[in-house]
Image (cartoon, coloured by chain):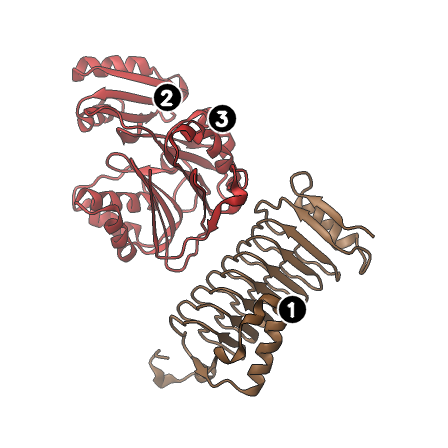
Amino acid sequence: MCGIVGLLIKKEPLRVHLGEWMVPMLIGMTERGPDSAGLAIFSKSLPVGQHKISLYSGLTTDGADFNWTGMRHHADETLGISSTIQHSDNHAILTFVGNPELVKRWIHEHYPAVHILSTGSSIDLFKDVGSPAAVASRYRLDLLQGSHLVGHTRMATESAVTPDRAHPFTAGEDFCLVHNGSLSNPYGIRRMLESHGIHFDTDNDTEAACRFLEWRLREGDTLEEAIQKSFTELDGFFTFLMGTANQLALIRDPFACKPAVVAETGDYVAIASEFRSLAHLPDIQNAHIFEPAPEEMYVWRI
Amino acid sequence: MENIKFDLQTTSVREINKFLHHEIAEGTVPRIIIEHPDGAHNIAAGLNVNCEVEIRGHVGYYAAGMNQHASVLIAGNAGTGVAENMMNGRVHVRGFASNSAGASAHGGLLIVDGDAGLRCGISLKGGDIVVGGSVGSFSAFMAQAGRMVICGNAGDALGDSLYEAVVYVKGHIKSLGADARIEDMTADDHQALESLLNQAGVSYSMHRPSDFKRIASARNLYHWNADANQEY
């Protein structure tokens, strides 16, 4: 099972509604994915040189009471950076000027229980265990603003129900992926990528797909080229929805085992596993609604 | 007698289906109208009374599945498995239908005005399906009895492992499945097609039976051949 949702708002003035329009989409997919939920939201890029890292403290002993400000001061002192932190509950976004790889390594060393959710200059990522409605209200996802997002509701089949195994998965910067389905060769992909020095955070099959695609992008492939390679390398059932700083991309396996439906108007492109997650959207009666074909690549740009 | 109207924003699918199953007798209600389906699953499934149901919008999975006697009009798109396992009656989708439309239908007529997804008519057991648009890959897979009319194109592996069902295609066939072959149209085929297109409605009168190809089983898979080396 699992449910996926995606939303890209075409018109700048409407982007304040991104979170508000998306939360019912996410909740609409509760029956497909009741155990965890998450989303990655993309908004205007930070000024050149600035980066942000989304962090999760639910796996630390302090949980939601984690001392985020203390961690920020500690980072500033030892790394010689000047950072800001915005936090709520288990979630924080650390923004700074500096090398994100160094900052991430520092967090791994000094705060190994803090989970790094995403890195980039445009992406913020939220995910946790619990029903989609509970996760949405816990992190006030309805208040989020931005140009596009990908979201996921999970019914775990391939690995345990934990926050780090919830979707979206990310790799590199400003890239994320959600998955409905299951892969049959994730360990083969994983061994191949590990031989290139790529590190994995979990034993989840989707992480293998996510790291494969990000590796191809880093090797210089366009998103379209990377996706084309995934059709030959990845075996299994999948509908994948991917987000980058300025694109949403959707693909389905050749047997179209996992569903997807798209609704497009002059204002937005909305994607969901099923229409019931799209029914509430404005002007849906006049939207162009279609089912994406298997093995076709659908890419929307902001 | 007045039409009966339900609104799925205020009434649950379970309540509406309960009404349709237990609280109407044949000929007592001219038409049951269901508004705001909004993609809900199992709407009007298992109808065992001869009645007319109109669903105004897009439906989710298994709409009008296991239909026994009703005539169901879906004025919108249908999710996976519309009219699956239909026994009799009529189901008409005005928009497109997702995967496995009419799967395993034993009788009745399914009409899809738009495209149908993959595996349309899989394991068909005697029902008839008319698709105004195109069908996806693996349609009519292992279809045992019944007829399928495709006014558009067909995807890969059409009619793979067909038994005695017959498929008529007007457009392009991307590829035929194992043991499916194109055969000459007979006078009986012309008559059958004419009748199915008529039953599907006036908008299908634009199609002429002579423009269709007949696809049926070569029956080579009926008996296992140890020398075939898995190549069929």
User: Which residue is label 2 attached to?
Assistant: A61
Which residue position holds label 1?
B108
* Residue A6 shown left or right of residue B28 in the figure: left
Q: CA distance from mark 1 to mark 2?
A: 62 Å
Query: Residue A25, image x and y in percent?
Result: 49, 38
Name chain B's colour. Answer: brown
Looking at the picture, tell me which residue is in the foreground, A226 or B169.
B169
Marks 3 and 1, how far apart at CA: 47 Å
User: What is the x, y in percent for residue A163?
Assistant: 39, 33
Dot 2 amino acid type: Thr
Q: Quadrant of residue B51?
A: bottom right
Residue under numbered circle 3:
A137
The answer to whether dots 1 and 2 both sit on one chain is no
Against B170, residue B21 (above or below) is: above
Q: Residues within 10 Å of mark 2 (few under 14, many from 20)?
A: few
Where residue B122 appears, x then y in whole percent? 51, 67
Chain letter, disc 2 residue: A
